[in-house]
Image (cartoon, rainbow, N blue to C red):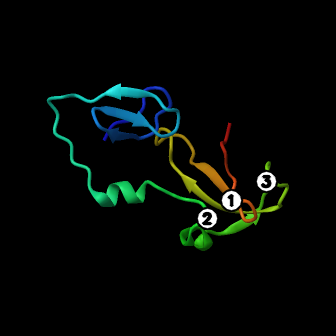
């Protein structure tokens, strides 16, 4: 498992590079290292808006910056170092716009 030097998010393997899904930072893979990526790892990292999984997410009052709706589904995810708080993600129930809220 590799983590981004820029933002601390987990990197994903793409061909001969490690690519950060959060900030887009790229770095080459070590050609001498052995990597194992299972289908379960890839599927568990993806949260899509607009599919059946999001209907299982809890809802809360949150103002959508795109359509001014006041209800959103939410989830929390650890995207930084383990000693920092989780990031809250919101998905608008009307337009499926995604945004995040950090404890800064």
User: Where residue 68 sits in the image (x, y, percent)?
Assistant: 85, 55
* Image quarter of residue 20: top left
Q: Residues within 10 Å of mark 2 (few under 14, many from 20)?
A: some
- Density class for disc 3 (Cα within 10 Å; few <14, some 14-19, many ≥20) is many
- Which numbered disc covers residue 50? 2
Residue at 46 percent of width and 42 percent of height: 82
Q: Residue furthest right?
A: 68
Q: Are marks 2 and 1 in contact (CB under 8 Å)?
A: yes
Q: Is residue 12 left or right of residue 33?
A: right
Seen from this angle, which residue lies furthest front? 15
Image position of 90 with respect to 34: above or below: below
As helix, strand or loop, the secondary structure at mark 3 comes to loop
Marks 3 and 2 sit apart, C-alpha to C-alpha, by 15 Å
Q: Nearer the viewer, mark 3 or mark 2?
A: 2
- Give the residue displayed 16% in from the left and 39% down from the top: 34
Disc 1/disc 3 C-alpha distance (Å): 9 Å
Q: Quadrant of the C terminus?
A: top right
Please name the residue shown 50% across and 31% down the image: 7
Q: Which residue is mark 1?
A: 96
**Residue 48: % across, % down:** 54, 59
Of residues 86 and 25, the one drawn nearer to the viewer in this rendering = 25
Mark earlier in primary sequence (2, 1): 2
Q: Name the spot of residue 43 as percent of width and height, x first.
A: 39, 59
Residue 64: mark in rendering = 3
């Amino acid at each position: 498992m590799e983590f981004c030097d820029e933002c601390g998010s987990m990197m994903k393997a793409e061909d001969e590079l490690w690519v950060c899904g959060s900030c887009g930072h790229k770095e080459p893979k070590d050609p001498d290292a052995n990597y194992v990526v299972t289908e379960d790892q890839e599927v568990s990292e993806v949260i899509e808006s607009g599919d059946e999984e999001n209907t299982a997410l809890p809802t809360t009052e949150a103002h959508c910056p795109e359509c001014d709706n006041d209800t959103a589904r939410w989830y929390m995810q650890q995207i930084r170092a383990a000693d920092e708080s989780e990031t809250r993600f919101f998905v608008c129930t009307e337009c499926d716009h995604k945004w995040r809220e950090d404890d800064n």
